Amino acid sequence: MQLKDKIIIVTGGGQGLGRAMAEHLAAKGARLALVDLNEERLAAAVTACKSAGGDARAYLCNVADEEQVSGMVAQVAEDFGGLDGLVNNAGILRDGLLLKVKDGVIGKMSLAQWQAVIDVNLTGVFLCTREVAAKLVELQRAGVIVNISSISRAGNMGQTNYSAAKAGVASATVVWAKELARYGIRVAGVAPGFIETEMVASMK
Ligand SMILES: NC(=O)c1ccc[n+]([C@@H]2O[C@H](COP(=O)([O-])OP(=O)(O)OC[C@H]3O[C@@H](n4cnc5c(N)ncnc54)[C@H](O)[C@@H]3O)[C@@H](O)[C@H]2O)c1
């Protein structure tokens, strides 16, 4: 794949897999828009991408916020003078059993736990894909969107919220591949197993 000078948004690019993918793309000459909530980590990731050989800029943006996402995509296209791709990588965990039972029900997965993960891991992917696809159509540019699902999409204990979101990402990837191919936009997904990052270190 020719990545030199391609303008690519990587969400959750401040650390973990997002930063690793960004550095890899930077080493191939890509121009990266790193999106995250953590300003300090974003700044370190931008420096790392630049020393790997690519151009990079930081964008503070919550992928679950519709206004912030549409503003961020417009800003990236303006700053770089175009757009070619998106890696939908930002994600969170709020693990817990649906029910905790010990002489009766002593705990439940809260609605807040459910909603937080659906908001970031599923709605965030929907919003970023929609806005990037719309920008690519507007600019009449072909592009590539890669979604990070997970092995947990098949159903992992303690991850009702995460498994549902990652299964949603996997099926939406197929929908968008079918819908967007006519505009020259290719959509694909990756569903990794466990990789040692801060996210995995936080799991029980
Ligand atoms: N590490 C694994 O084993 C593994 C396996 C399968 C899938 N994944 C997926 O890969 C992706 C990256 O995982 P990781 O292990 O690098 O996690 P991580 O926690 O190390 O990094 C996630 C990044 O996303 C950012 N982020 C979180 N919420 C955000 C929001 N609302 N808006 C913008 N940025 C936000 C965080 O600040 C962080 O920098 C996630 O989608 C995760 O579900 C990870």
Image (spheres, rainbow, N blue to C red):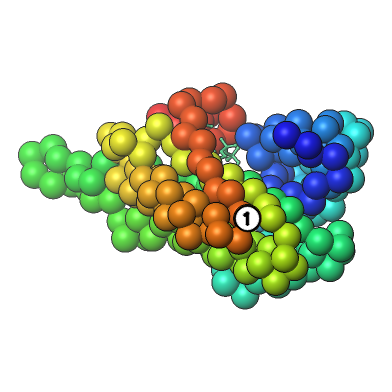
* Quadrant location, the N terminus: top right
User: In the picture shown, does residue 183 fall above or below 5?
Assistant: below
Asked if residue 40 can be seen in this view, the reply is no
- Image quarter for ligand 1: top right
Residue 117's x, y, as percent? 43, 53
Question: At which x and y percent is residue 160?
Answer: 30, 45
- Which image quarter holds the C terminus? top left
| Count of numbered marks | 1
Q: Nearer the viewer, residue 90 or 142?
A: 142
- Farthest residue to the bottom: give it: 67
Res. 78 image quadrant: bottom right
Which kind of residue does numbered mark 1 sit on?
A: Gly
Q: Residue at x 81, y 61 (%)?
A: 82
> Helix or strand or loop: what does disc 1 sit on?
loop
Q: Is mark 1 within 8 Å of ligand 1?
A: no
Q: Residues within 10 Å of mark 1 (few under 14, many from 20)?
A: some
Q: Position of residue 68 (x, y in %)?
A: 65, 70
Q: Is residue 55 left or right of residue 14?
A: right
Tell me: residue 203, above or below residue 122: above
Horizontal arrangement in the rendering, residue 131 relative to residue 118 (left or right): right
Q: Which of the 4 image quarters holds residue 37?
A: bottom right
The answer to whether residue 114 is left or right of residue 26 is left
Residue to which mark 1 is pinned: 184
Front-lying residue, 46 or 6: 6
Residue that lies at the very extreme toward the left in this rendered image: 103
Q: Which residue is painted at 69% across and 63% down in the image? A: 136
Say which residue appears at 64% left-offset and 62% top-offset: 132
